[in-house]
Image (cartoon, grey):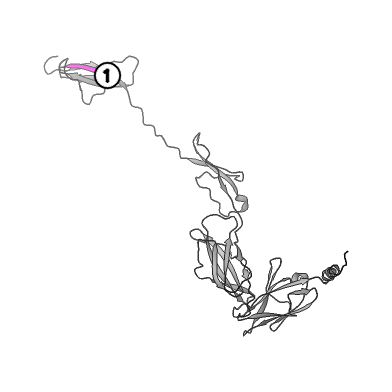
Amino acid sequence: MPAGGSVTLTCDVNQFADLEYDWFRQTSKNSKKTAVAGESDRVLVTSEAGFYTCRGRVKDSDPVIIHETEWTYEWRAAKLNTPPTSNEYRIIRATESDSGGYSCRGRRDYFFSEWSDIITLTVSYEPRPVLTVSPSWLSPGASVTLNCEVEHPSAGWSFYWYKAVPDLSEKSSSYELLPDGSGTAQDSYIIHGQTHTAGYVCRAGRGDPEYHTDHSQPKFVWSADVHSAASLTVSPDRVQHFTSDSVSLTCEGNFTEWRVRKFSEDGRLYSDCRRMTGSTCDINTSKSDTAVYWCESGSGEFSSAVNITVRSMLLYIYLLDLNHLDIT
């Protein structure tokens, strides 16, 4: 190459037309190759002496954008006619029909994950606690144990304990929280030194914010203590009566308003006397009148309690006849 001249070099790779090229130059055969900057064409025009080599390579393709497919979800339950596709399945108003097993799995394009473990959901009607008391009949000064049980018991319940306070105007009772009776962890509550007839209820709560059940049905402990502020007398004065007897129940004490309450053998609580004259309730006895009776005043006092048994006169005569049989 004459001084100040140039030379044209051509790089040829058989069978490949759409290529890019790299050019390299050495000052001697044993020197390091250096790339000829800025050259990528098949033809190189240079004015520099040296040893040259070339290389053909396939051009880079246009970029391809790959989108990651988001997960969708499937839910499996016999009642889900149109299962949701989100990762959350929400039941707005749960009913007993929502009870059952639920599982889910994820889907991305044509790939499916395994089904999850089955979660069993049980939906029941709002639980109502059941209160029991022991003992039912008091010896003066005895301790009384209250037990509150929730249907379908499970962990996390706290318990609230109340004394029933008579409300004659509403023909019902209000509830007064017992000392230290708010949100106890134990399902039992002990009352020490109880001397008079009294009624109690409980309820339960759990969760945050706390959900509360309804109050239990009231349960009573009865006392025959004659030293209570109010008393109940029965005329004729006996425990056992016969059907169709006329019996008078009289409430006594320094109170102006009264109601006679009756707790029957079948566990029903009655708050009204059918025939109340002043502070006296008159009844014509029947078998259903076998019950515990007591009085409640408008100021919230309970009287002593009386247990009345009503028997059939025919049965009594039959038993008398048996007693007089001469069996030899």
Determine the image quadrant of residue 48: top left
Quarter the C terminus occupies: bottom right
**Closest to the observer: 230 or 78?**
230
Which residue is outermost to the front?
328
**Closest to the observer: 256 or 145?**
145
User: x, y (%) of residue 273?
Assistant: 71, 77
Membership of 51 in magenta stretch: yes
Residue density around tag 1, few if under 14, some if 14–19, many if 20 or more, within 10 Å: some
Give the main secondary structure of the magenta stretch: strand
Tag count: 1
User: x, y (%) of residue 315?
Assistant: 83, 68
Q: Is residue 219 above or below residue 299?
A: above
Element on which disc 1 rests: strand
Q: Is residue 174 above or below residue 205?
A: below
**Closest to the observer: 20 or 279?**
279
Determine the image quadrant of residue 43: top left
**Closest to the observer: 82 or 167?**
167
Residue beneath disc 1: 55
The amino acid marked with disc number 1 is Arg
User: x, y (%) of residue 247?
Assistant: 75, 78
Region rendered in magenta:
50-55
Q: Is residue 317 above or below residue 15?
A: below
Quarter the N terminus occupies: top left
User: x, y (%) of residue 89?
Assistant: 53, 48
Which residue is outermost to the left?
3
Membership of 160 in magenta stretch: no
Is residue 327 shown left or right of residue 230? right
Residue drawn at point x = 61 percent, y = 64 percent: 132
Determine the image quadrant of residue 246: bottom right
